[in-house]
Image (cartoon, coloured by chain):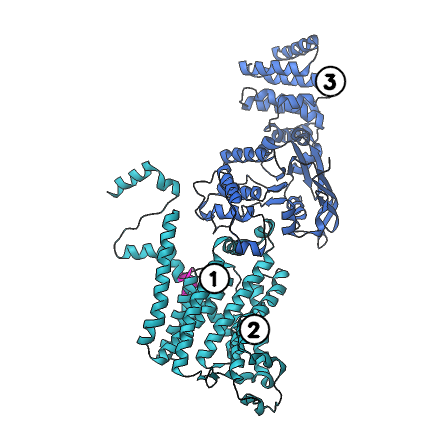
Chain colours: A blue, B cyan
Amino acid sequence: MVPILSIQDVTVSFDGFKALKNLTFSMEPGELRVIIGPNGAGKTTFLDVITGKVKPTSGTATFKGKNLVRYSEHEIAKLGVGRKFQTPRVYLNLTPRQNLELSCNARKNLWHSLFSKTPQPERRTVSGLLETIGLVAKADIPAQFLSHGEKQWLEIGMLVAQSPDLLLVDEPVAGLTDEETAKTGELLISLAKSHSIIVIEHDMEFVRQIARTVTVLHEGTVLCEGTMAQVQNDPKVIEVYLGEAPTLSAEQLNVIRIAASMAWADANFEQEEQNFILDRLSLQFSQDKDLQHELKVELQNYLAANIPLEQSVQALATENDRKMALKLGYEVLRVNGVSEQESQVYQRFIQLLDLPLETVREIEQDVEKLFSK
Amino acid sequence: MLTPALKQKQKGLELAIGLGLILVFLVIVPLLLSDFRLNLLGRFLSLAIVALGIDLIWGFTGLLSLGHGIFFALGGYALAMYLQLQLPEGELPDFFSLYGVSQLPWFWKPFYNFPFTLVAIVVIPGIVAALLGYLVFRNRIRGVYFSILTQAALIVFFNFFNGQQKLINGTNGLKTSTSILFGQSVGEPKTQLIFYGLTVIFLALTYLLCRWVTSGRFGNLLIAIRDDESRVRFSGYNPTPFKVFVFALSGSIAGIAGAFYTIQSGIVSPQYMDIAFSIEMVIWVAVGGRATLIGAILGAVAVNYGRSLLSEKFPEIWLFFQGALFLIVVTVLPDGVVGWIRSEGFNQILRLVGIQPRLATYPQVELDEDIQRERETIEE
């Protein structure tokens, strides 16, 4: 398939500061891609390059086979790229209906704006959109009276009204309530059926809700790309987000995650469980006292995140890893009694691990011995 | 919310009021006022025309032009040149002989022709505005830089017209009051009455034109450009032609205003391109209310009447008064008088006379029966 958007080796430099460094990126039609990255990673500049606001110092950006460098912002918008800004930008003195009609207008020149009325099909499109974004009741009051979330949706609606092929959405859930965030996620997922979408977002919970493929930007270049689980376990990504390289490898981290998910199984991560995991696991991976302490702090940062068990178990490569995961997981479960929920999760875990039954029994007995002392 | 039927009714009412006002100004006002006062009113109404142009470019599109004196003066000069040429065959306007010019400069020649002059009054300021606008807007010069550039252009034009005695009589300007137009002396009260009537009609026409331009999709787009130009760009519009068009239209309107003002004042001179005068135009619109067309008209007429009353009685304090007026409007009534009345002033006035106004809320609240019932019980 021909990529809808392809960026080759793009560098953008502002007075010698390189906001983007040899960035290469490509995206298939119909894809929903999430871009994450720490502040100053170049996410917004990346969108600026695609929408023609900033011209690359070197490299090429092509959209549907057309070199974007040659077009200005409004021409790129007409080619089929819609952009939603970080803070909602709608025309505050116009009503939502007027906002949408301006975007929906197919012939955006002086003559037609002046002499022709909004055609009937466009009016119908706008009415339909107002329903989709839930603004029918407020369609005819100035947009300045809308709430923050409603403005965000109105702006997304304006993008859709443009009927673009590629939607660029910059932080759509910043400042929204949980309910609104979930709704926005659903809206984006349903839009993804008929559009290619790039979403930039900080809210990891939201990213997990919508993401299929995630691209991590750092210092103006692509750090890594993959599923949410892959990206989260990537030591490079962790280093970028936490400011230092993790002392553990990606595989070891995964084992820890599994153990932690055992503790989470009854949807209640008790302090005792947490302390035990921290002590036990730092012992497991390091002999040095100082390092153990450091590791404990580091672990605390990861434990809060929960990842589906299936994904984590699949990522366990060797049998040794799987044994270790089982051992730690069982230990964590044993710490303060096994509840019914926990035992259910544990059964599923054993199934997923797919180890010989004797091995499982052996490990369980080892742990029991440990606790009976 | 307004239903279509209500809207229709409101439109009919507005039309009736508008026609009534035009009739009052055409028939009744001339009977009530002396020739001098009527001439004064005619001049103020011409200034109201340029205020409409300023409102179009500033109030609706958000571009503060401090150079509308250029277009105003160009319209005035175009008409004055035609009137200066109403002489017996072979004679030149008097002032040329003072500077030893025996050959009519080439650009005067088309102004022998009346239809050309009428077109020139509208088109020349429009073209100058379009050129200036194109250069500025294409390079995305906005905000205060645009204002500074228009003011700089104003100074350039002022100095040019001021310095060219041999071409257009320099600082003395061109007199029109003694000229003959269609066998009538321009300065006569009878001819002036006709110009007054034409001013009223053209003010009404300009108002309708501006209303048409600012309503519908184009008007919405102007407001969109004012509120967030880059959003407009990313929605697929190129704002440059829209801005150039509105600036040119606004320039043409200023040209018409300049012509009417010139013929009723009896002279056009480079003073029309005085910096203060162009700033005053902006003040009229600010006082009346930006982005309210009726406000621009009321502002221009009211401020100028105030000026003539005050400066007749206390000539020294007028400038202080004008400054204070601008400060008051900016700090207390940022939306101007008409804007204030439209937003909250009406309710405040109602409250002053002891009527509790109805609170407007969201439409779904208005339609919710439970809330309405609650509201009624509380009010009882």
Pick the front one: B83 or B274: B83
Looking at the rendered structure, the secondary structure element under dot 1 is: helix
Question: Measured from the top left, where is residue A296 in percent x and y?
Answer: 63, 28
Identity of the residue drawn at 60% across and 50% down = B236
Pick the front one: B356 or A349: B356
Tags 1 and 3 both on a single chain: no
Q: Which residues are magenta?
A: B327-336
Q: Which mark is residue A161?
A: none
Tags 1 and 2 both on a single chain: yes
The chain ID associated with circle 1 is: B
Identity of the residue drawn at 38% across and 73% down = B305
Mark 1 and 3 residues: CB-CB less than 8 Å, in contact? Answer: no
Q: Which mark is residue B154?
A: 2
Residue with the mark numbered 1: B210
Q: Can residue B307 be seen here? A: no
- Quarter occupied by residue B211: bottom left
Question: Measured from the top left, where is residue A290 in percent x and y?
Answer: 68, 30
Looking at the rendered structure, the secondary structure element under dot 2 is: helix
Residue with the mark numbered 3: A320
User: How many angstroms separate mark 1 from mark 2 (CA)?
Assistant: 24 Å
